[in-house]
Image: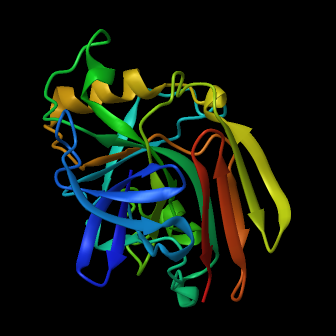
Amino acid sequence: MARLLTSEGIRHAVYLNEEWHHIDDPFAPVPTFLGPVTSAGKATLLAPTCPAVIVGIGHNDGNHPLPIQPWLKSVHTVASPNDVIEPSWRVGAVNVEGELAVVIGKSAVDLTAENALDHVLGYTIANDVTNATQAVIDERLFQAKSGTHYTPLGPWIETDIADPGNLGIDVTVNGHAEARSGTFNLIFGVVECLVHVTKWMALEPGDVVMTGAPGTIVGVQPGDTVAITIDGIGTLVNAVA
C-alpha cells in the first residue's frame, strides 16, 4: 500500500499486477477501488502515511538491557522516499538509523499480546536521523531528532508480513554495506512495544511506532546517499545534503 503524487493530487493505492490501483480509504477493512491506475514506473511515491504521532523505542538492542523506553518525535520531520535529508551539521555528527516501523490500522488503547497485531495495518521502513552529538546531552531527544526530513518513511506499507520479528535490515551508504542486522536482534518485539505504548497513550490509524535500531546506526557525511533495505518490504533511499 502506498501514497502517490498524481496529476489529480495525492492518492492511496495498492500494488496489483505491477500497477498501483487507486483506492479510497486505506484503513477500510476492504478497500474501495476508484478505477484509476498508475504504472509502477511512473509512480511518485510519498511517505506512505501521515501520522499524527510518531513513537520511537529507545535502546532496544542487546547492548542496553533496559525497560521499554518510548519517546516522541515530531511529525514535521516526516520525509518521502528520495527527499533530501537536511542535517544540522553545525551541532555535530549525524547518524542514520535503519528501523522497522509499525503503521497502526485502527484505534489502539490498552492492547494485549493477543490482540496487538490486529491493530496493525502493516510495516514500512523508517530512517531515524539523529544529531548524534546532541543525543548525548539531550535526554528528551528534542535537539537530537527534530531536523528537516529527519524521519524518511517508505517506500510503501507492506501488509503481509508473517513474522515482523525475523526481518533482516541492511544499511548502505553510497552503495557500500555499512550495517547488517535485523529485527531478531531487538530486545522487545512489535507486540511488546505496542502493548507498552498503548498502556500509556492511544494510537490512531496512520500513527507510526519505530521499533528501534538493532545495530543499524551509521554515520553520514554531506553528499552521501543512504539506502535502507528490510526483507519483505523493500528499500528506502534518501540523499544527505
User: How far across and how far down the image is residue 76, in percent?
Assistant: 28, 73
Front residue of 133/227: it is 227
In the rendered structure, the answer to whether residue 55 lies left or right of residue 163 reads: left
Q: Which colour scheme is used?
A: rainbow
For the view shown, which residue lies furthest in the right direction? 176
- Quadrant in which residue 224 is drawn: bottom right
User: How far across and how far down the image is residue 20, in percent?
Assistant: 42, 59
Give the residue displayed 17% in from the left and 35% down from the top: 106
Q: In this view, does 125 lie above or below 211?
A: below
In the rendered structure, the answer to whether residue 147 lies left or right of residue 180 reads: left
In the rendered structure, the answer to whether residue 103 lies left or right of residue 216 reads: left
Q: Is residue 186 above or below residue 151?
A: above
User: How far across and how far down the image is residue 137, in percent?
Assistant: 48, 64
Asked if residue 70 can be seen in this view, the reply is yes
Give the residue displayed 53% in from the left and 65% down from the top: 40
For the view shown, which residue lies furthest in the front direction? 35
In the rendered structure, the answer to whether residue 102 lies left or right of residue 234 reads: left
User: How far across and how far down the image is residue 156, in percent?
Assistant: 45, 55
Q: In this view, does 85 lie above or below 241?
A: above
Asked if residue 74 can be seen in this view, the reply is no
The C terminus lies in quadrant: bottom right
- Quadrant in which residue 186 is drawn: top right
Give the residue displayed 53% in from the left and 40% down from the top: 59
Q: How many labels does the image show?
A: 0
Front residue of 79/89: it is 79
